[in-house]
Image (cartoon, rainbow, N blue to C red):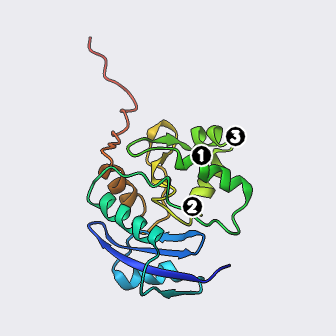
């Protein structure tokens, strides 16, 4: 793998970490408890040094992340990602997910179909849990069957997922009651 550098970005969501190689973003870490915790999570098992200057593609990604945290509609599909070591099936899943736009959601099953793997919703769930660049590969937009929140492996879990969806004006309703009252 090429040399990796990283930076931390202070946003309205909290500190977000970005790590990159010359070929693209290799990791994004969503806000943890504080700056230090975000950095620890970002560089865990990654040989990285903090950058003094940012390459143009990273500076552009930083700008998009900040704008997203402000609630602005942004498109991360043009941000280069480096998925070294990611198997072809997960690459196809991530590529399909990158085409899901701001404010859109789909289920694990729907993403499996779009990626060419119908019936493999559980594999989609596993791939989302191992997503190295959440937000850029927008795994927060993938919901469980019936539009339920599903899981989220980033710091803060499903609370973070709901917060990100709220930034995109996506609301998840409470499930309908198990039994409706009859109006006799």
1 or 2: tag closer to the N-terminus: 1
Q: Secondary structure at mark 1?
A: helix
Q: Of tags 1 and 2, which is closer to the observer?
A: 1
Q: Quadrant of residue 7?
A: bottom left
At a point 47% along the width and 84% down the height, the residue shown is 40
- Label 3 crowd (10 A; few <14 / some 14-19 / many >=20): some
Given residues 35 and 4, the one toward you in this image is 4
Quadrant into which the C terminus falls: top left
Where 6 falls versus 164 (above or below)?
A: below
The residue pinned by badge 1 equals 96
- Label 1 crowd (10 A; few <14 / some 14-19 / many >=20): some
Contact flag, marks 3 and 1 (Cβ < 8 Å): yes
At a point 56% along the width and 66% down the height, the residue shown is 132
Marks 2 and 3, how far apart in space? 19 Å
Q: Secondary structure at mark 3?
A: loop
Quadrant into which the N terminus falls: bottom right
Marks 1 and 2, how far apart in space? 16 Å
2 or 3: tag closer to the N-terminus: 3
Q: Position of residue 116 (x, y in %)?
A: 69, 40
Q: Position of residue 2 (x, y in %)?
A: 65, 80
At a point 32% along the width and 56% down the height, the residue shown is 163
**Residue placed furthest toward the top:** 184
Q: Which mark is residue 129?
A: 2
Q: Position of residue 63 (x, y in %)?
A: 35, 65
Q: Position of residue 77 (x, y in %)?
A: 49, 52
Task: Indicate left or right for 95 with 49 as reference.
Answer: right
At a point 45% along the width and 39% down the height, the residue shown is 147
Q: Quadrant of residue 118?
A: top right
Q: Which mark is residue 116?
A: 3
Contact flag, marks 2 and 3 (Cβ < 8 Å): no
Q: Secondary structure at mark 2?
A: helix
């Amino acid at each position: 793998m090429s040399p990796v550098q990283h930076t931390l970005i202070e946003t309205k969501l909290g500190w977000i970490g970005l790590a990159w190689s010359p070929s693209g973003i290799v990791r994004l870490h969503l806000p943890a408890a504080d700056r230090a915790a975000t950095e620890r999570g970002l560089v865990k098992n990654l040989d990285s040094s903090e950058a003094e200057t940012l390459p143009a593609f990273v500076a552009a990604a930083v700008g998009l992340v900040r704008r997203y945290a402000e609630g602005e509609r942004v498109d991360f599909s043009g941000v280069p990602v480096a998925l070294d070591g990611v198997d072809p099936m997960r690459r196809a899943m991530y590529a399909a997910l990158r085409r899901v736009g701001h404010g859109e959601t789909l289920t694990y099953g729907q993403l499996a179909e779009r990626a060419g793997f119908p019936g493999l919703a559980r594999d989609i769930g596993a791939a989302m849990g191992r997503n190295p660049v959440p937000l850029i590969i927008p795994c927060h937009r993938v919901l469980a069957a019936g539009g339920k929140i599903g899981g989220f492996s980033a710091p803060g879990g499903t609370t973070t997922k709901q917060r990100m969806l709220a930034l995109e004006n996506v609301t998840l309703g409470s499930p309908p009651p198990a039994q409706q009252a009859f109006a006799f």
